[in-house]
Structure formats: structure tokens, C-alpha cells
Amino acid sequence: MNIFVVGLSHKTAPVELRERVSLGDTEVRHVLTQLRESRTVLEGVVLSTCNRLEIYGLGPSARAATDFALSAVAKVTGVNRDLLWQYAYVREGEDAVRHGMRVACGLDSVVFGETQILGQMRDAYQLALDEDATGSVFNRLFREIIHVGKRAQTETSIGREAVSVSYAAVQLARKVLGELRDQQVVVIGAGHMAGLAARHFAAQQPKSLLILNRTLERAQALAAEVGAQARPLDEDEVRHALIQADVVLTAIGRGHYVVTQEMVADAMVSRRGRPLVILDIAVPRDVDPEVSRSTSVYLYDVDDLEGVVAANLEERARQEAVVQAMIDEGVRAFSHWLTEQEVVPVIAALHQRGQAIEREVMSSLVRKLPQLSERDQKVIHKHMMSIVHQLLREPVKNVKELSLQSGDPSYAETLAALFGLEFETGHNRVRVEWGQGSSYAADAARRPALS
């Protein structure tokens, strides 16, 4: 049996395709039903978010199983299967397990280190469990995946540091003013950088958020996306914003000052000492640097913010290395568990064989020496079992160590062959092929345009 994951994400598929394959719980149940009723995929979990659709599965053939999984998605969504394959990626074996853990830790997300994905992974597993789509292998696997994700969130600061100028601006505002829920925020501009900043500010749920831009339609479009108000940019609006707002961010870069020292000085008279944070992320600058001379005004330009980003990138790299070590530990733990599923039944069968031989010999001995008292029989039985245990101790210990160290269950198979063992594995127990895994994706140059 082979573990695999097949999926599409923000890294491989355009948003218009991701929208078409975004599945609600009902659609996920339909896909799980198809997987459960097939012989191609024995266990499965479907993860569907706004940025990814992934099907984790266990099957005799990873290639046949991934094709069946995408066919199930195509059937539910109406999207052509060949089109899905053009944008799909596949991970197998250890690569699949490692990928699942990276996803749960937020290392594969649009916003690096984000925590929402762990809850989504947990919900996806619970839904598959409720639909009876998982078995012993995936129950263990997803418990390990969720455990690693929890450790990444609680034991590291991954994802908590600002690694873009726009996000660093928001973090600096929070450091000066505290939480922004009671603050009024004004964003001047509606381009790419201003849009990123507006989205980050909106996530903080400020008291109010206003977008000012010379082209009102662009301001309105951005405002509609982030739940803000929009007004045309002119000097009167800027002066009013400097009086009313707690945070003003500018991102125009037209080569002349949008905010002057005289504007700020006038505004601070009306503000009566209430602090004002001004974040100038434009190049050329939008704010006269002399503004910083005003009392209770905190001005940061792009150089200040890039310094914050550089320091945070170093810290994030350190934290990512810590998370990667947690993932390595999780992969090893799951690998050892898989190996134990092969070793334990063989060891149990070996002990049963030893006990059976002891019983046969003891029975023969009692028949030949009927004069043995019950006490004598107990003493002999105890010493015979001691011989059995001592004889088996080293082979059992060595086969366990060799199998776990190498991840190769063939040592257990060799032991079983040497002793001529036959043992019951149970109808739910499956042999999972395990190794370094593999991954592949469709050639980007061959991907067709979406219709």
C-alpha cells in the first residue's frame, strides 16, 4: 500500500480554477463516498480551503489512486479531469507525510506560518473519520500531523513576525498604540502596496478604515474588498484625516509631499497631544521628514520598516528551522509506528510458538512422569518458560532495533521465515510501502489556458 497526496494550491493553480474546485462539506462527503466505495483508495481525507484542495489517500497503486481521486473531484465539480491534472501536484510516501505536516504548520500557506490551516486540517480529518473514510493508518497519520502542527504553533513564533513592508507598518502601529480595535486608520493610495496594507489593517478590525485615492473608483474597489470607506484624495481630506485618525499610511510615491510639516503642525493643535502614527511606505516619500519634529508624532519611512523586516526575516528563518526539526521528528515517529505494525505481530507469533512448544513438552512430560506433584509441575513449567524467554530475548530485541533503525520491516519477515511462523494480521491491517517518497507535477509549459 502507498500513501499519497494529490492536490492543487495557490502555488500551482490560478484563482479561477481554485474557485471551481473549492468544496463545501456536502461535496467533500461525496468525494469521500467515492473513495470509500472504491478498491483503489482504501483510506482518504479531503482538505478543501480557499487556497488549496488536497486529497490524502492510501492505496495499492499511488498512480491509479491519484487518478481516481481527481476523477472523483471532476465528477463532483464538473471540472475536466485533464484540466485538473495540468495544475496538480503529487507527493508519495515520506514526501506525502512531510507535505501534510508542512501544511499543518503553515509553512505552505499564502501567509507563512498562519494558524487557521491547522484547524482546517483537523476539521478535514474529523469529517473523514465521521464518514468512515479512514482506518488505522490514517488515524495514526493525522493524529501525528495535527500534533506537529500544534507544536509549531505553541512552541515557536513562526508566522508572528512581519516579513513585508506593509505588514511591518501594521506591526509598528500596534507597538505604538497597542491593539487597533479602538483606532481610526487612514490609507492614502489604492495601489499594490496600499492594498496590502489595507488588508493587514482590516484584519486588525480597527474602529474605522478609510481609503483616500485620487481615482475614487480604485479607492471604492479596495474599500469594498476590505470593508472600508472611500473618498477622493485632496488636501482638505488629508488635513481632516490628520486631525481625526490615529494611524495614517501613505503609499503613492508621486515625487512630492502629500503630508507636509505645516499640515501636521496644524492638526496637532486640534488633536491636543493625542499621538499620531504616520507610516510612509512610498518611494519617493509622501511625507515631509520634518514632520518627525512635531511632538506626539511617530513617523516611520520605508527604511525604518525594511530594517524591521530584515530582522524579522532572520528570526523567521531560525523559527522555520525549529519547525522543520519538529516535522522530521514527526515523520520518524510515524515511520517507526509503521514498522512496528510489521514487527509486533511477528514477535507475538514467535512468543506464541514458544509457549505452544512448552505446553506440548510439558504435557508429554506429565504423561511420562505421572508421579510429578502439582508443585513439581509448576517449578518445571516456570523453568521451561524461562528457557523460552531467554532463547527469544536477543532475536526479538535485535529484530525490533534493526527494523526501527532502518525502517525496513523485512527483518521481521526474515525472522518469521526462519521460525516458519504463520500469524494472523487482522483484516484491517495493511502493509504500507515506505521510503524517501517522490513528488511530481505537470509541466507548466503544457498547462492550457482556462476557458
Image: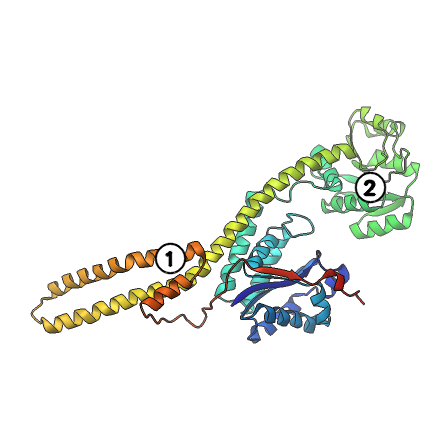
- Is 167 on the left-hand or right-hand side of 5? right
Tag of residue 400? 1
Tell me the tag on residue 187.
2
Q: In the depicted view, which residue is nearer to us: 420 or 297?
A: 420
Give the position of the C terminus as an image quadrant: bottom right
Among the 4 quarters of the image, the one containing residue 260: top right
Disc 1 marks which amino acid?
Lys
The part of the image, by quadrant, that contains residue 271 is: top right
Q: Residue at x 86, y 35 (%)?
A: 284
Vertical position of residue 312 compared to residue 340: above or below: above
Please state which amino acid type lies under the numbered disc 2: Val
72, 262: nearer the viewer: 72
Label 2 element class: strand
Q: Which residue is more in the foreground, 130 or 180?
A: 130
Q: Earlier in the sequence, mark 1 or mark 2?
A: 2
In the rendered structure, the answer to whether residue 44 lies left or right of residue 221 reads left
The image quadrant that residue 99 belongs to is: bottom right
In the shown orientation, is residue 345 left or right of residue 165?
left
Q: Residues within 10 Å of mark 2 (few under 14, many from 20)?
A: many
Residue 332 placed where, x, y %?
49, 53
Find out whether the residues at labels 1 and 2 contact each other: C-beta distance under 8 Å.
no
Q: How many other residues sit within 10 Å of disc 1, few (<14), some (14-19) or many (≥20)?
A: many
Q: CA distance from mark 1 to mark 2?
A: 63 Å
In the displayed structure, 310 sits above or below 203; it is above
Q: Nearer the viewer, mark 1 or mark 2?
A: 1
Q: Is residue 102 left or right of residue 307?
A: left
